[in-house]
Image: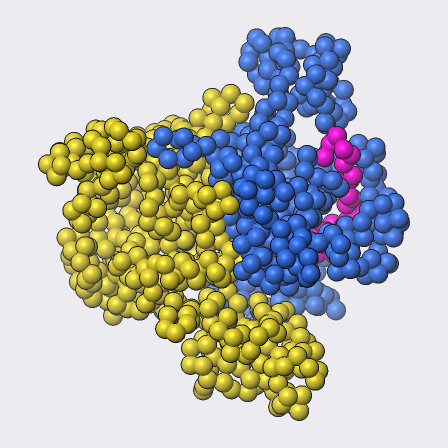
Chain colours: A yellow, B blue
Amino acid sequence: MASYEDVMSLSVRRGFVWPAVDLYGGLAGFYDYGHNGVLLRRRWEDLWIETFLGLSDNYYLIDTTTILPEAALKASGHVDHFTDILVTCTRCGESYRGDHLLETVTHEEHEGLTTEEIDARIRDLKIRCPNCKGILGPARAFNMMFPVGIGPTGKDRAFLRPETAQGVFLNFKREFEALRRKLPMGLAIVGRAYRNEISPRQGVYRMREFLQAELQIFFDPATFGDVFPSTEIASSSVRVAWAGEKSEPVAHDFPANELISRGLPSWYVWHLVQVQRFYLESLRTPRASFRFAELDEKERAFYNKIHFDIQVKQESLGGFKEVGGVHYRTDHDLKGHEAGSHTKQSVTFGAAKVLPHVLELSFGVDRNVWALLDLSCQKKDRVVLQLPPRLAPVPVAVFPLVNKDGIPQRAEALYATLRKRMPAFYDDSGSIGKRYARMDEIGTPFSVTVDHETLEGKGVTVRERDSQKQIRRQESELASSLERLLSGEASFLA
Amino acid sequence: MASYEDVMSLSVRRGFVWPAVDLYGGLAGFYDYGHNGVLLRRRWEDLWIETFLGLSDNYYLIDTTTILPEAALKASGHVDHFTDILVTCTRCGESYRGDHLLETVTHEEHEGLTTEEIDARIRDLKIRCPNCKGILGPARAFNMMFPVGIGPTGKDRAFLRPETAQGVFLNFKREFEALRRKLPMGLAIVGRAYRNEISPRQGVYRMREFLQAELQIFFDPATFGDVFPSTEIASSSVRVAWAGEKSEPVAHDFPANELISRGLPSWYVWHLVQVQRFYLESLRTPRASFRFAELDEKERAFYNKIHFDIQVKQESLGGFKEVGGVHYRTDHDLKGHEAGSHTKQSVTFGAAKVLPHVLELSFGVDRNVWALLDLSCQKKDRVVLQLPPRLAPVPVAVFPLVNKDGIPQRAEALYATLRKRMPAFYDDSGSIGKRYARMDEIGTPFSVTVDHETLEGKGVTVRERDSQKQIRRQESELASSLERLLSGEASFLA
C-alpha cells in the first residue's frame, strides 16, 4: 500500500517512469521511461504477446503508422465523434473538461452528458472557474486528436492516431489475403497512441502520448461461439461490477454460465475469463483488486456495443481504475471503411461472404506498468518492490562480500556468466545490507553473494527478496536454478 | 540480386512491409509492417540491442516521448537549422527538394548547397518544373519537423521529434544520477522519429515516419581512448570510402591503425570496427556490399564533427545506400540544453567536473530491414529469401506429408511442442513442393515433414532452405537440434 507520491518518488529515484522534459519545466501529460521502466515494460509486453497471441495460431502482430489521413479517421467516426466537452473560463482563459469539472464539485461521475446538460448543471450548481472564480463560457465539443499537416504546404490533413485499432482495420483485408484466409483472425499492435487531453491532471493515469497493446479479433458472428465454447469456461467465475455500481468499490463473482444467461455472448465471457486469468495468474494481481466494470450506453465509446473496463484497484490512484477494456465493436469499423474507401471489406469464408465483426482486447501499457508498481510497492521502514519475479527488470544481482582476497574476481566471473543468460547487476559499493536494499527497491527477486566459503568450493549465497531467506548454491548450477525460480518451475525453499 | 519491384512485390505478397493506407489511396512516405515484417524487425532490434548495449555494462535502454516542446528543439538547433531547401513551381504549385531537383538533371550529388547556390544552378541549367514545365520560384529553407499544438488552444508549440537522440540528451543528467555515476555511460532508444520530407519519392528509403535505433555514448574526452584501446583493434581493418569518392561504388580496406594515423580518434575507429562486425558477422552482409562513407563538412549535419555513414550496397536501391551513421556530436547537445534550460549539464566524474562529449551510433531500422530483404532476395525461377537463420521471422515449418493415416495428428502434436520453443508454422495445404516454396519466400530456414516412416519411429525429415538437402531427426531431439542450428552452434550436414 503506497500513495501516489510514494510510488512516483520510487519511480523517479530508480529510473522507472518520470515526467518528461523536466529540464524545460515539463510537458503536462507526457512521461519518459528510464532504464528500469523500459525493462519492466518490455517484460509486461512480452507476457501480453505470449498470452493473447497464444490464444490462436491465426493471431499475429503487425505495426502501422501513427499518422493517419483525415479520410480514414472521418470514416472511422473519429473526426466527428472523438470529442470531449470543453469549458473555458471567460476571464482567465483556463480550459476544463466539462465532466471533470462537475466531478470535482459533486464527487460523482458525469460521463456521457451533452453540452446542453453540462451547461445546465454548471448553471444549477453555480460553478465558477476553479482558477480565478471567473464566469465559465458555454460548453463545446473539442476533438481530442492532434492534427498534423503533411508535406510543404501542410494541405494533406492528417492526425496522430487516437488508438492503434484503426491501423489494424486498414490492413485487415490485405492480411486476410496474405494469411490463412480463415476466421477468426487476430491482428495486434503494441504501439503509441495520442490524445490531446484538455487538462491532464491525473499524473500517469491520463497521458497525452501513451502506449496501447490491442488485439482485434475478426470473426464470423455465426460461428464464433463454436470456436471458443462455453464448455471450456464452465467452472470459471468472473469478477464483475455492473454499470450502476461502478463508483462503489465492489465486485461480484459470477459463474461464467450465469453471465451468459444474463445475455452476454458466450465468446465474450470466454475472453473475460482469459483476461482475468492473465491478471490473477500471470501478473499476480490480488483477486480482491481486480474486476470488470460494465459501461452503459451513455458511457461507452460510439463504436462499442458491449464494453467492460478492466480495472485494478490502486491505492495510489484512489481505488479501482481502468487499465484496459474488452470491447465488442460489431462491424462498425469495417463497415465505416467500406463506405469511406468505396472498397468492399467482406471476405469469403467457408461458403459465404462475411463482413467480420470485431472483438477488441485493449490494454493501456503505461497504466498496466503503473498498476504493477502500485501493487508491488511495499513501504514499511523502507521500500520493497514485490514484483512477480519474471517481470522484474533485473532478475539477479551479484555482490562480492568484500573487495579483497580474490573475491571480486570470482564475483565478476560469475556475473559475466550470468549476464549471458539474463540481465544482471554487479554491485560492490556499500554494505551488503545497503546493496540488498537497493535491489529490493527495483524488485530484483534474487541477490547472490560471493564470500570466503565460495573460494573453498562451498558455493554462493542466494537471498530471496520477499522472504529475506538465504540458501547456498554451487556456481555451476546457479544460472539454471535461477531460471527455474524465475519461471515458477521451482520454489525457493523447496 | 533483385530489383526494387521484385523486393516490394515479395514484401507485399508475404506481409513484410507495404505502403500504408492504400485503402485511401496511400500516404507518400508512410509504410506499414505486416505479420512477417514485424517478426523480422523485432529480431533485428533484439540483435542490435544485444550487440551494442553489450559493449559495456553501463549502457541502458530508455524510452521517451515522440512529442517535444519547441524550447527543447530550439536549444538543440533543430528549430533554426533542421531544414531542407524547398523549390516550388510558380505555375502548378508542385514542391521539390532543391538538391534532388539538381540531381535528377545532373546525376550528381548536391548536398550542402545554400539557397542562393541552388537558385544559381537552376538558372544556369535552365531547369523548369518537371511536372508542368512551369517556372520555378526562389529556393527557400523549409523546416522538416512536423509541428503539433498541445492543449485546447494549441498555444503550447511542440514538434514530433526528428531523431530519438534528443530524448536521450534531455534525460542524461537524471540517468547519470540514478545509475552508476560513471562515464562512459550509454543510453539507447529504439523508437519512432518523424521528418516532413518535401517529396518522398524513393519508396522505403525516404520515409516521413520511421524507426531509429540510436545509442548515445556520453564520455570524458580525456579518458575515452583508454576505455576502448586501439590495441584491441590492431589486427582489424575497416572498409572506407572517403568524402570525394562516395559517388563511386568503391571501398578500401584500411588497417585500423592507419585510420588512426590519418587523424581519426582511436575510440572512433574502435566503434567502426564494432559496427562493421555487426554487419559482416551477425547480419552476414557480404564484405563487398559494406562500407563506411565519409561526409565532409558541407554534407554533415550541423551537430556532427566526424561523420561516416554506414552503407550497404543494394541492387533494389541502385548501389551503396545509407543505413546508419557513426557521429561524433562533441558536447554540442548538452551545451545547447545547458544554455536553453539554464541548468548545468556537467557531472562530477573522478576528481573533475566534466561536460561529456557524445558518440552516437545511429541506425535506421526500416532501412536495415529493407537491406536484409534486398540482400536475401534470390530470384531465379522462384524467390528464396536467404535470411540469416536467426533473423528469419518463422524459423521452422511443420508439414504432414499426407492428410490421412494419423499423420496430421502426429504432425500437429510436433507443431504444438515446437511452438513452445520458437515461432512455427503449420501447413497442410497443397503439394510438399508448394509448401517448401511458400516457406522459402519468407526465409524459413528449416521445414519438417512428418511421413509414414515417422509412424514407424524413424523420425521426421528436416529440409534446409539453402542447400535444399534433407536429414532425418528423432522428434524428441528436434527442438534442441533446431535451436543449435539457428544459433549457429551446429551446422546442418555435420
Q: Name the side, left or right, on which B334 lies relative to B292.
A: left
Q: Position of residue B405 (x, y in %)?
A: 48, 67
Query: Residue B299 lies in magenta, yes or no?
Result: yes
Q: In which quarter of the image is residue B323?
A: top right
Q: Give the range drawn in magenta.
A: B278-300
B381 and B364: which is toward the camera: B364
Q: In which quarter of the image is residue A340?
A: top left
Q: Which residue is drawn at 65% across and 68% down?
A: B484
Q: In which quarter of the image is the N terminus of chain A?
A: bottom left
Q: Position of residue A348 (x, y in %)?
A: 39, 41
Q: Name the side, left or right, on which B420 lies relative to B218.
A: left
| Image vertical order of residue A320 relative to residue A436, above or below | above
Q: Can residue A466 be seen in this view?
A: yes
Q: In which quarter of the image is residue A320?
A: bottom left
B127 and A274: which is toward the camera: B127
Q: Is residue B239 visible?
A: no
| Image vertical order of residue A107 relative to residue B488, above or below | above
Q: Quadrant of the C terminus of chain A?
A: bottom left
A439 and A360: which is toward the camera: A439
Q: Which residue is drawn at 19% across and 62% down?
A: A250
Query: Residue B20 lies in magenta, yes or no?
Result: no
Q: Which residue is drawn at 62% across and 85% down?
A: A451
Q: Residue at x 68, y 34 (%)?
A: B302
